[in-house]
Image (cartoon, rainbow, N blue to C red):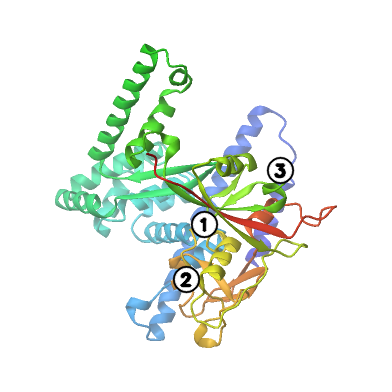
Amino acid sequence: MVEAKVQEFVTFLDSLPAAGSEAENIDRIHNVEVAKRALSAVQAKATHRFVEQRQAQETSRRVPASMQIKGVEAEVGLARGESPFVGAGLTHTATALCTVLPNTLQALATGQVSEYHARVVAEQTNHLSDAHRREIDAAIMHRLGRASSSQLRTLIQGHAYRLDRAAADQRAGDNARRRRRICMDPAGEGMVYLTAELPTHQGVAVMDALTKTANQRLAAARNTDDSDGETRGRDQVMVDAFVELLTGQTTATGVTAEVVVIMHDSTLFGDDDLPGWVLGQGPLPAGMVKDWLAAPEAAKFFRRMYTRPTDGQLVALESVRRRFPGVLSKMLKIRDDTCATPWCNSPVEDIDHRQPWAQGGKTTWANGLGLCKRCNQRKQNRGWSYTGTTDHLTVTTPTGHHYSVPTRPPITQVARWNSDPPLHNLVIDIDIAWPTAA
């Protein structure tokens, strides 16, 4: 019934005649945005109710409190086509809105704030007591819909520091010890994002040091008429200084690194234009990979990996052991590239059995699966199952919902399979290592 009504609403919106003026289009954009925000409030209420129902059911089944509502965030993520990580944030936001942030929920339901701004309020107060969260929710009510996300964050932080200074001091100390981390994410075009989360004074010190180094190098380049220094802007000089200072190398291009690339044989040995693929990072231009291979100081190791000519799926390997051996494990990582769970973008950390070993699952290519640690642990929870073949994966959740995704080696996603003439059924696995610069 609900699905039919939702589809009817979508059909109605899609059937609206085109707006006759610029002003009417702006009005339509605004009105649809208000409707989206109201729907987000409906989603939040449904999410909170789902969590309550699951907890009540598990309580009635006498599931220990420490084991209750395991994996609900992943179910919410799957239902919304998002990763388990995003699903966790959406679940926590929904719970907060429906329990301790009534004014923010009301602002969302009436279209005053977006779901993103509502999530900012929930996340910025999640370390506080329920009473303090309600107090802040009331204090910022007049700013909802008027403040930007950055303004909301600073406003909430100010109230939090005022309400519980001792706890704020404690959290600042704890964060300095526990939240420090460095993350790497693909940025496309052969680039990555390298992000550091560290205490404010340390971050300011790092930027200050890089800025001073960049200024000195730019000044030296101008004084010596260094044309290369003139072609690099301040940002590029700062990045090169960052790499050199961090790695101890004399030049940013001479770093020590090991990269695993897969590439089709027709590109590696011929003139094809199919890109290479760095595991977990994505495609790279063929010319960039060949430039790496042409570097005389780089050590290279090549391994042939045969595929089905029809669709590029890698050829199977099997083992009688419980643990997946090295070559089979690496092939599975190449096939899945990132965590195989639908919409999870985390790197592959565990190679495990689709059908559990304890239930007779074999250590084979068909039964192998590349997962991040959290998804691998989550699939052990009651009601979860991962089934399928080498060509597709189906995840079944405790509510009986099924989410299926195709499984194809990443490089085949940009290859011309079933082309005329057909491509060779050979993919090359290349390990490239640059030695430490002298």
**Element type at mark 1:** loop
**Element type at mark 3:** loop
Q: Are marks 1 and 2 in contact (CB under 8 Å)?
A: no
Q: Which residue is mark 2?
A: 376
Q: Which mark is residue 411?
A: none
How packed mark 2 is, by other alpha carbons closer than 10 Å (few <14, some 14-19, many 20 or more), is many
Q: Disc 2 or 3, which lies upstream in sequence? A: 3
**Distance CA(mark 1)–CA(mark 2):** 14 Å
Q: Which mark is residue 273?
A: 3
Q: Which residue is mark 1?
A: 345
At 38% across and 81% down in the image, what residue appears? 59
- Quarter of the picture containing the N terminus is bottom right
Q: Is residue 349 above or below residue 111?
A: below
Q: Are marks 2 and 3 in contact (CB under 8 Å)?
A: no
Q: Amino acid at mark 3?
A: Asp
Residue 263, image x, y percentages? 64, 52
Q: Amino acid at mark 1?
A: Asn
**Distance CA(mark 2)–CA(mark 3):** 36 Å
Q: Amino acid at mark 2?
A: Asn
Residue 149, image x, y percentages? 40, 40
Residue 22, image x, y percentages? 66, 28
Q: Disc 1 or 2, which lies upstream in sequence? A: 1
Residue 185, image x, y percentages? 47, 48
